[in-house]
Image (cartoon, coloured by chain):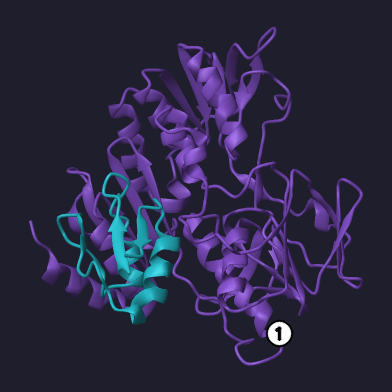
Chain colours: A cyan, B purple
Amino acid sequence: MRVVVDFDLCESNAVCMVVAPEVFEVRDDDFLYVLDETPDEALRPKVEEAVRRCPKQAIAIAED
Amino acid sequence: MRSVCVVGASLAGSRAAQTLRSEGFDGTITMVGEEPHRPYDRPPLSKQVLAGDWQPERTALSAGLDDGLDLDWRLGVRATGLDLTARRVSLADGTAVAYDGLVIATGATPRRLAGTEDMAGVHVLRTVDDCLALRADLDRAPLRVVVVGAGFIGAEVAATCRRRGIEVTLVEALSVPLGRVLGTEIGSLCGELHRDHGVDLRLGTGVEGMDGADRVERVRLADGSAVDADAVVVGVGVTPATGWLEGSGLVLDDGVVCDETCLAAPGVVAAGDVARWTHAHVGEAMRVEHWDNAVQQGAHAARRLLAGEGPGAGQPYCPVPWFWSDQYDRKIQLAGRAGLDAEVAVVMGSLSERRFVALYGRDGQVIGALAMNWPAQAVRWRVRIADGVAWDDALTEARAGDRP
């Protein structure tokens, strides 16, 4: 599982950070940082929830 | 439970369907939608799609997660009635859908102004078809648009029209835009945003009527003035779409009345704009018309339906509501609730630089946080509100964390 963020779409609403703080962090510079691009499978439910709850639909999961 | 009917092929409805499947439900899911379209995302309709930057197809709701949900689609047909005893939804085409479990996610319908319902050039903005009709009018290069209502939809439409170089008059019945939601000081700031971007903002006056031969040409205001208009957008709120449920036996009171768990009747749940449920932490019945609520409540309602009378049935739905609004170059995010009677303190940044965090408090608790152009803080305070942070502690925390 690889986390892919479309930074052209991302508006740093930071919902992903609430759902999966292990993977996503919006810092005080208002940019989103992906802390772990290839998170452990155990985090899949959280990452999928972040994908669903992103208001800009800017997050995707690539399987490779 | 072998079959679930989801009425409303909406954000809340599609999240409910998605959750049913991810929780292991393998029975039939019938999705009934009045619009002919698969579920799509509404926030871009007042922004990217209206601006012409996006084609509407781009709003499709899926993100790759909806494949394989195996839904039985009934699109382009309205639900017209509900028989709770027989567990059957009747549809406008004369057919019916039998169900074991029902998810009501019919959303809400924009209010219109009496006497202008059929007038050409007078728009509301809710559906993608509404958006494309308005966009087509804007594409005819109108000189002047009148937006009625300076709430979030009206404000975003005004901002998008200004970006397109269209003259905008924004008419608001309240003396402060969003005053009831955000309070006087921050509401006034939102008004200034519009004025700074060249919007002719008319506050404290309603609309008396509209005139025009073939289509709208002029809006008459209650203060006696009149404004020429090539197109009008009415954004004066919505009414929950419960007409089809009248006489069904469900309790309707500005929405489908649910308990703390989103259950409206045995085997019936509601989610999204249409649902009025009792928030167990706040202790009040509420209805929330925000994107994030549709997502979360859709999922909660699905789990509630699956729980039946078993474990998990008593799980209350207790979110910290949250929404965002993009206007010009400002992003406004509100977590929790605000309101006129709340105490307000700007704890980070400043109103003058238009990048700030304001906390709203009542009875010694923080009940809301508004962040303008500060998303990381919106999230931080959303989490703290969920923690139940006390007002005094929050002020101390905020001061300690403030950075230039």
Above/below status of B53 relative to B19: above
Q: Position of residue B3 (x, y in %)?
A: 77, 72
Residue B223 visible in the displayed image: no
Compared across the picture, whether B212 is left or right of B198 comes to right
Residue type for callout 1: Gly
* SS type, badge 1: loop
User: Which residue was labeled with disc 1?
Assistant: B308
Toward which corner of the image does residue B63 lie, by quadrant?
A: bottom left
Residue at screen point 38% across, 31% down: B159
Residue at screen point 57% across, 78% down: B23
Above/below status of B117 relative to B265: above
Q: Position of residue B57 (x, y in %)?
A: 51, 38
**In-front residue for pair B173/B318:** B318
Q: Residue furthest top?
A: B213
Quadrant of image for the N terminus of chain A: bottom left
**In-front residue for pair B166/B229:** B166
